[in-house]
Image (tube, rainbow, N blue to C red):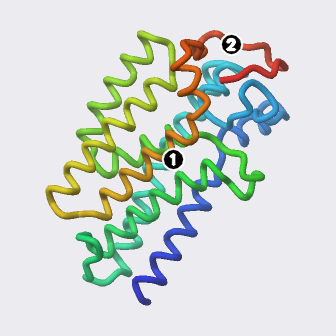
């Protein structure tokens, strides 16, 4: 199998792993409902907490986090078995598989074709991926972000700041070792998170971003 074919297979596999939308699955199985009909319409942790409560929200976070972590590990393992020793953009083919799979997991989560392209914002899945790529940095960033979220009750601020710090660290490390594929992944993960949080950024700049535990009524169409 050529590396190009392997990259395509890994990309497709990562995308459909990302399509496993825990928020939608939990809301349908538990509440016979679709989380995307309520609150912000987002299939993610914060909206699940606001609409259904803490436990469903944490279950969603854990599912999305493990999807990023275990999905990336699986695709990395596949790449290590079937790829060649060829180096592309400063990275081995096996690492390209890991990076490609990781990016496609986030894209699949954010734009799931199995759920009408209406998914989440990718923060929890990106965090899972971060623990595969650079676990120590990811742990430090996670602690800092949870402290920030606890202090401000603004999840989007913690998510954006955390991914920015993590991406910047990967970019610096990738440049230092000449792994430009890693740099590309770091930039893309940050860019897609910013795009998905564009409304949140606008509200942050206006000082109007909602607090985590300011929960809307289940059938109110409030923003996240």
Q: Earlier in the sequence, mark 1 or mark 2?
A: 1
Q: 223 or 33, which lies in front?
A: 223
- Number of other residues with Cα within 10 Å of mark 1, as a class: few under 14, some 14 to 19, many 20 or more: some
Picture residue at 29% right of the left edge, 76% below the top: 88
Q: Is residue 93 above or below residue 52?
A: below
Where residue 112 appears, x then y in whole percent?
A: 68, 54
Q: Quadrant of residue 95?
A: bottom left
Q: Does dot 2 land on a helix, a strand or a loop? A: loop
Residue located farthest toward the bottom when viewing the structure as drawn: 1
Q: Are marks 1 and 2 in contact (CB under 8 Å)?
A: no
Where residue 191 appears, x then y in whole percent?
A: 46, 46
Picture residue at 51% right of the left edge, 17% below the top: 154
Picture disc at residue 215: 2
According to the picture, the residue beneath numbered tag 1 turns out to be: 192
Q: In the figure, is residue 28 to the left or right of 1? A: right
Q: CA distance from mark 1 to mark 2?
A: 26 Å
Q: Quadrant of residue 89?
A: bottom left
Q: Does dot 1 land on a helix, a strand or a loop? A: helix
Q: 211 or 202, which lies in front?
A: 202
């Amino acid at each position: 199998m050529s590396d190009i074919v392997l990259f395509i297979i890994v990309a497709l596999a990562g995308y459909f792993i990302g399509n496993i939308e825990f928020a939608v699955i939990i809301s349908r199985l538990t509440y016979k409902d679709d989380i995307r009909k309520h609150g912000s319409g987002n299939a993610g942790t914060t909206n699940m907490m606001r609409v259904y409560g803490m436990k469903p929200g944490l279950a969603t976070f854990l599912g999305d986090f493990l999807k990023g972590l275990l999905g990336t590990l699986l695709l990395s393992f596949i790449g290590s078995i079937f790829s060649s020793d060829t180096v592309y953009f400063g990275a081995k083919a096996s690492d390209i598989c890991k990076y490609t799979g990781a990016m496609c997991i986030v894209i699949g989560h954010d734009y799931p074709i199995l759920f009408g392209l209406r998914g989440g914002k990718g923060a929890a899945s990106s965090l899972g991926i971060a623990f595969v790529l650079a676990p120590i940095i990811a742990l430090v960033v996670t602690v800092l972000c949870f402290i920030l979220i606890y202090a401000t009750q603004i999840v989007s601020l913690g998510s954006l700041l955390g991914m920015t710090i993590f991406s910047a660290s990967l970019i610096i490390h990738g440049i230092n070792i000449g792994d430009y594929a890693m740099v590309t992944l770091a930039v893309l993960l940050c860019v897609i998170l910013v795009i998905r949080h564009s409304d949140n950024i606008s509200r942050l700049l206006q000082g109007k971003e909602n607090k985590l535990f300011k929960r809307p009524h289940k059938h109110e169409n409030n923003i996240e």
